[in-house]
Amino acid sequence: MNSEATRRSIQNDDAISFIRLDHDFHLSLTRLANFTIIEQVLNNLHNLTQLMGLKAVSKHRRMKNVLMEHHQIIQALEEKNPELASQAILNHLEKTKETFIIVDDS
């Protein structure tokens, strides 16, 4: 994960770069876990997730929270703590789902 580039995108309020970096982060995780099918799904859904992500970070100012959630996932992986990593991933997915529901309703 390119944390510095992600921080710059947040500082510059550059949602497009942020979403691209977010996509790269998720692809990196699927590659590390050797989830080829999930990687293909992410790539196939890229345009839809990019549009939804742009709405989410633009309307709900989620960039900083997403960065923090990603760091929690990375930290758990670095600590080789699968329980904590699972918890961090589930938390990230739940927060993302909540935001997407709000965005979809607006």
Image (cartoon, rainbow, N blue to C red):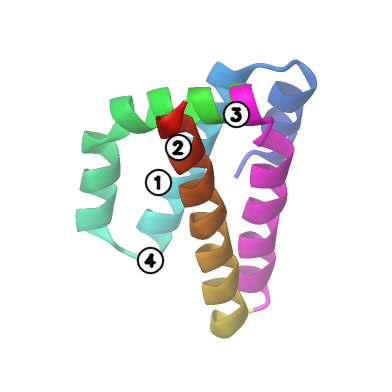
- Distance in Å between CA atoms under marks 4 and 3: 27 Å
| Rendering coords of residue 66 (x, y %) | 64, 44
Q: Please report the residue visible at 48 percent of the width from the left and 31 percent of the height from the top.
A: 103
Q: Residues within 10 Å of mark 2 (few under 14, many from 20)?
A: some
- Residue 65, image quadrant: top right
Mark 1 or mark 4, which has the lower sequence index? 1
Q: Nearer the viewer, mark 1 or mark 3?
A: 3
Foreground residue among 30 and 93: 93
| Rendering coords of residue 27 (x, y %) | 40, 46
SS of the residue under disc 2: helix
Residue on which disc 2 sits: 23
Residue on which disc 3 sits: 57
Q: Are marks 1 and 3 in contact (CB under 8 Å)?
A: no
| Rendering coords of residue 100 (x, y %) | 46, 39
- Distance in Å between CA atoms under marks 2 and 3: 13 Å
- The amino acid at mark 3 is Val
Mark 2 or mark 4, which has the lower sequence index? 2
- Residue most extreme to the right: 11
- Distance in Å between CA atoms under marks 1 and 4: 10 Å
Foreground residue among 17 and 93: 93
Q: Is residue 21 visible?
A: yes
- The amino acid at mark 1 is Leu
Q: Is residue 24 visible?
A: no
Q: Please report the residue visible at 66 percent of the width from the left and 36 percent of the height from the top.
A: 62
